[in-house]
Image (cartoon, rainbow, N blue to C red):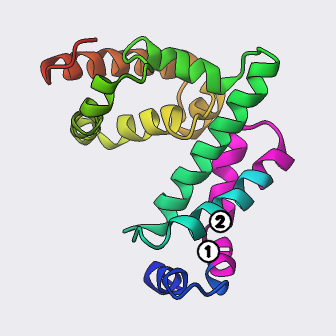
Amino acid sequence: MDDNEIIALFFARDEAAIEAAQREYGAYCAAVARNILDDRGAAEECVNDTWLKCWQSIPPQRPKSLKNFAGRIARNLALSARRESSAQKRGGGQVQLALDELSEVVSGGDTPEGALDRAAFQAALDGFLASLPERHRNLFLRRYWYLDGVEALAKRFSMSRTQVTTTLHRLRQKLRAHLQQEGFDL
């Protein structure tokens, strides 16, 4: 079943939409959640909550890509669960390391001014990613979107750990320069 058919089921408020979405994208959403959470049970709970959020969001939203839509929901739910968990017990882990790395470039503060700039920032980030060679773009996304660890990236991209960290450092520097060039005060 393709995305348009599944989305049509959501619009028809047919519960088969949830089953079809789970069948098509459940493994993908579970992988996203497991990368963020080190707990398989918590990841499964995020995936279940993902389908509830999809049910609540479609309609009125009509996503162009159900995979990306559900993946983003799963990621956000997993990050929220991770924040709740780490609020109770502060610890390291790949999520915090990746977010700390990016905090060198952008801050996470939510201000009214920041909310207004969010669309411009997203466009600038999209432009930055589009300017990268495919390998670097994939490395950047695997680290900062999917939150893969350095060891996993080294294995995936056939690089040494040092090459991965050096490349990521250079990409963050390029991102900082790109954002400053676009007029963002970092």
Image quarter for residue 174?
Answer: top left
Look at the numbered disc 2 and give the secondary structure of its residue: helix
- Residue 149 % position (x, y): 63, 29
Residue extent of the magenta highlight: 18-44
**Nearer to us in this view, 15 or 167:** 15
Q: Quadrant of the C terminus?
A: top left
Q: Residue at the spot x=27%, y=24% of the render?
A: 113
Q: Residue at the spot x=61%, y=87% of the render?
A: 14
Q: Residue at the spot x=53%, y=82% of the render?
A: 6
Within 10 Å of disc 1 (Cα), the crowding (few <14, some 14-19, many 20+) is many
Q: Is residue 89 above or below residue 61?
A: above
Residue position marked by numbered label 2 in the rendering: 51
**Nearer to us in this view, 183 or 134:** 183
Q: Looking at the image, is mark 1 or mark 2 earlier in the sequence?
A: 1
Residue position marked by numbered label 1 in the rendering: 21
**Nearer to us in this view, 126 or 45:** 45
Q: Residue at the spot x=45%, y=35% of the render?
A: 139
